[in-house]
Amino acid sequence: LGVHAMLVQPVKGEDFGPLAMNYITHAKALVVMASWNYCEKTDSSYSTYYELKYALEHSITIIPIQLNTSYPPVPPGDPMGAELCQYVLGPALARVEAYKAWNATKVAAKIFPGIVKAFSRDRLVRE
């Protein structure tokens, strides 16, 4: 589709955290792979909880992909994760439903317009 997706893929021995931080601070859109435990608040300051929180606080376009029948996710542990999901990934935010059958090409085609819009919005803000 012509989009350069950035995935955090550290090599053996490389620290995941700085890579994740670099990508999220330069992101125009965050594609949320909303599994049942997405946004679990863990001891890591690089968890999906903090990624989603950062995206919300910095007005980064959030594009959720629903991976389970229940939505928004209700991650285990600290209830702040479920509360953030309920607030950010609520019914007003359009999502791609991919929980019945996964097809990466179809999902990519469905999220593409949201990514283009995020880059267009960023360009308008800078002008």
Image (cartoon, helix red, strand yellow):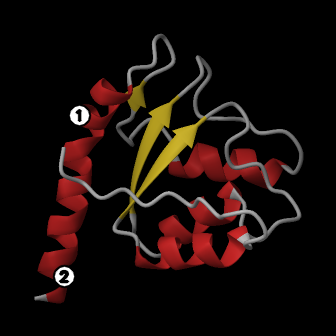
Residue 4 location (% of width, % of height) = 30, 58
Which of the 4 image quadrants contains residue 58? bottom left
Question: Would residue 50 be found to the left or right of residue 71 on screen?
Answer: right
Residue 64, relative to residue 3: is it above or below?
above
Task: Please tell me how crowded label 2 is: few (under 14), some (14-19), or many (20+) other residues with Cα within 10 Å.
Answer: few
Residue 65 location (% of width, % of height) = 46, 35
Q: Which residue is mark 2?
A: 125
Residue 123, relative to residue 64: is it above or below?
below
Question: Would residue 38 be found to the left or right of residue 71 on screen?
Answer: right
Question: Would residue 47 be found to the left or right of residue 85 on screen?
Answer: right
Q: Where residue 109 is drawn, which disc sits there?
A: 1
Question: Would residue 108 be found to the left or right of residue 99 on screen?
Answer: left
Residue type at numbered disc 2: Val
Where does the C terminus fall, quadrant-wise?
A: bottom left
Measure the C-alpha gap from mark 2 to mark 1.
25 Å
Of residue 68 and residue 83, the one placed in the foreground of this image is: 68
Tell me the residue at 43%/61% (across/down): 6
The number of numbered badges drawn on the structure is 2
Residue type at numbered disc 1: Ala
> Mark 2 or mark 1, which has the lower sequence index?
1
What secondary structure is marked by label 2?
helix
Where does the N terminus fall, quadrant-wise?
A: top left
Which of the 4 image quadrants contains residue 14? bottom right
Tell me the residue at 38%/28% (across/down): 104
